[in-house]
Amino acid sequence: MTPRLLTIRLLCAVLALLPALAFAQAAPRRPLLIEGKQSLYQRVITRPGATLSALPDGQNAHSVPGFTVYYIYAKPPGSGDGARIEVGRSADGHPEGWLQASKAIEWQHAMPSPTRPAGSPCCSCGPSATSAC
C-alpha cells in the first residue's frame, strides 16, 4: 500500500468518526431539581462573607456579594463545616464554582403571582376600586 493511499484511507476513517465524536461530547449540565419536582431547580442565597472558588478544595476563593442567588449543580455527600456545593448564577449549564455550604441558605421558593379574573378589582374594595387602593 502506498503512503498516499494509506493517508487517504486514514483521512476517510477520521472523517467517518467525526459525527460520533461530536455526539459523544458531554451533554450540557443542569442544576439539581428540587425533590419531587420536574422543572424547579435547587437554589441558594449567599450569606454575607461567602466565597466562591474554582475547585472544591476552597483554594483561591474570591468573595461574592451577600444575598446573591445561585443554582446548585452539585452537592457532594457530607454536611461538615467545610462542605462545599457547586453553583452557578444561571441554569444554562455553566457552573461558576464552589461555595461553602455554611455560607448559603437553601431557597426553594418560587414567587407566586396572584391571578384574578379580568375586570375584577385588585382588592376587596369593590367595583369602585381605584388603582390607589
Image (cartoon, rainbow, N blue to C red):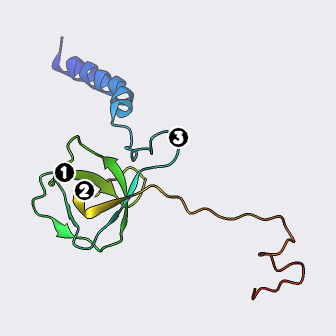
How far separated are the C-alphas under marks 3 and 2?
24 Å
Please indicate, yes or no, whether residue 86 appears anywhere in the rendered image: yes
Work out whether residue 33 or residue 36 is closer to the camera in this orientation and state it.
36
Residue 117 point in image, percent of width and height = 83, 64
Q: Earlier in the sequence, mark 3 or mark 2?
A: 3
> What residue would you read off at disc 2?
101
Kind of residue sitting beneath label 3: Gln
Question: Residue 44: x percent and y percent?
Answer: 36, 59
Pick out the residue farthest to the front: 124
As helix, strand or loop, the secondary structure at mark 3 comes to loop
CB-based contact (under 8 Å), mark 2 and mark 1 = yes
* Residue carrying label 3: 38
Left or right placement of residue 95 versus residue 59 in this view: right
Mark-to-mark CA distance, 3 and 1: 26 Å
Element assignment for label 1: loop
Q: Residues within 10 Å of mark 3 (few under 14, many from 20)?
A: few
In terms of depth relative to the viewer, which is nearer, 63 or 103? 103
The amino acid at mark 1 is Ala
Closer to the eye: label 3 or 1: 1
Q: Report the Cα–Cα distance between label 2 and label 1.
A: 6 Å
**Sequence-first disc among 2 and 1:** 1
Seen in the picture, residue 106 relative to 39 is either above or below; the reply is below
Q: Tell me the quadrant of the picture where the C terminus can be found.
A: bottom right
Say the numbered circle drawn on residue 54: none
